[in-house]
Image: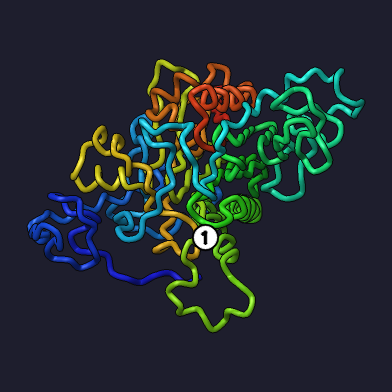
Amino acid sequence: MRMSQKPKPSHGLTVCPDCAEPLESGDRFCGACGHDLTAVPAAGVEPDRPTVAIGTPVAWPDAPPRDPGSLSTATQHPGDLPGTDSGGHDLPTLAVRTDGPVPPGADPAGETTAGSGDFELAAPDPRAAVRVDPAQAAPAPSPAPAAQAPAAPAPAAQAPAPNAAAPGSALCVACRAGRVDTDGYCENCGHAQPRERDHMERELDSVAAVSDRGLRHHRNEDAFAVSATTLPDGSPATLAIVCDGVSSATRPDEASAAAAEAAGASLLAALPRGTHPQQAMHEAIVAAAEAVNSLAEEPGQEGAEHDPHRHRNAPACTIVGSVVADGLLVVGWVGDSRVYWVPDDRGTPAARLTEDDSWAAQMVATGLMNEAEAYADERAHAITGWLGADAYELEPHTAAFKPDRSGVVVVCTDGLWNYAEGAEDMARVVPPDASDRPLHSAQVLVGHALDGGGHDNITVALVPFTVAPPGAGSA
């Protein structure tokens, strides 16, 4: 895979601190106000904090080589380390994609532009279809609950939507009167019916995930892959991958699906071989990036690899993932999808385990704004890292934790965390029995986002993390 080797600007800024004029790499003075950029202190590089120390031996080989001087000798817990970027790099400072929710104050019923992804009329609540009286529809076999759906062969496959209307046999979810034609539209009001990907659920013994189109977008551009496997010693390993298509790109739904499938398949191949989970996560993100890049390739364009416009607006998505294996919790990401840690004992603090690749996070990191100011700005959700052929460069972030208590890992897109942003906010909306009922809890979280407005696609995966009490294995 080709990655840009362009040097990053020494001042580490994307906008002028005085007038907010966009800056180019290597600028010494602002072209608008003349501000001396060389006087701005260079952004400090965060210390590299990769995999935390593990108290018990494991059979994995060493994780990727890191600077020995940066390793911590003390075991860290999610409550002590609320999110680290183990790459040790500055955030990319060049191209920025804008892919956020409806800005505060915007009129949700206002005009929409072609290709904006929003209905001119609000879409029906995707949850409403499950309340249609089945006696009014033509007889049809009842779909099996998502928890009992057979596992699909592809790791990114999900159970069919339990509320998807069966063409020719179901009532319209919008008018509740017309029948759905074979083309997927209501014969009475003409409303398009939910498609299989509009609402997806999947549950395994050790993980569950739910994805929903939301109430504003005409399609679901999120995707997920959840699966379980075993390590060489026979112990279980659980993985969850969540991808969010970049709406301003072409075919974002294809990008997220390709990334989720490739990352899930990569982890399923690497973990049983004994690859260290953090290394496996890094390789999975690289595999996902290659899968998304391949969507931009066009037959007969072999000689256009140097064309700077070739990959403009190429398919793109973000990615976040988690692996739970042998008492270790590994996370990896590119973009602004997140992982949260919510302990079963809500008297102990929850934590966010990832740092966004976003404009707001970069403003906070460079000291130009505090967190409240940055996230109140309309540019807050402009992402500075993504998977795609037009990405500046690929910088997978990975981190590893060893929790000392049981809890649940929440892997989600911004369609959820926009409605529960802080770790304590997420802990409040995660049901207390999430570790015992992950599918139900994922449904509750999606419902929370829908009740909050559902302005974006919503995807969440929940992975219970269990710590055996002392002496549990003794005779």
- 430 on left or right of 131: left
Q: Which residue shows up at 27% across the image and 54% down it?
A: 69
Q: Residue furthest bottom?
A: 303
Q: Residue at x 71, y 39 (%)?
A: 195
In the displayed structure, 314 sits above or below 116; it is below
Q: Please tell me which residue is depicted at 20% across the width and 40% down the height of the picture.
A: 369
80 or 308, nearer to the observer: 308
| Residue 61 position within the rendered picture, expressed as x and y whole percent measured from the top left | 51, 55
Q: Amino acid at mark 1?
A: Val
> Relative to residue 419, is residue 383 depicted above or below?
below
Q: Position of residue 62 (x, y in %)?
A: 47, 55
Horizontal relation, residue 386 to residue 325: left or right = left
Camera-nearest residue between 267 and 114: 114
- Hey, which residue is sitting farthest right in the picture? 139
The residue beneath circle 1 is 286
The part of the image, by quadrant, that contains residue 250 is bottom right
- The C terminus appears in which quarter of the rendering? top right
Q: Say few, some or many: other residues with alpha carbon within 10 Å of mark 1 (under 14 / 14 to 19 / 20 or more).
A: many
Q: Secondary structure at mark 1?
A: helix
User: In this figure, what is the number of numbered marks?
Assistant: 1
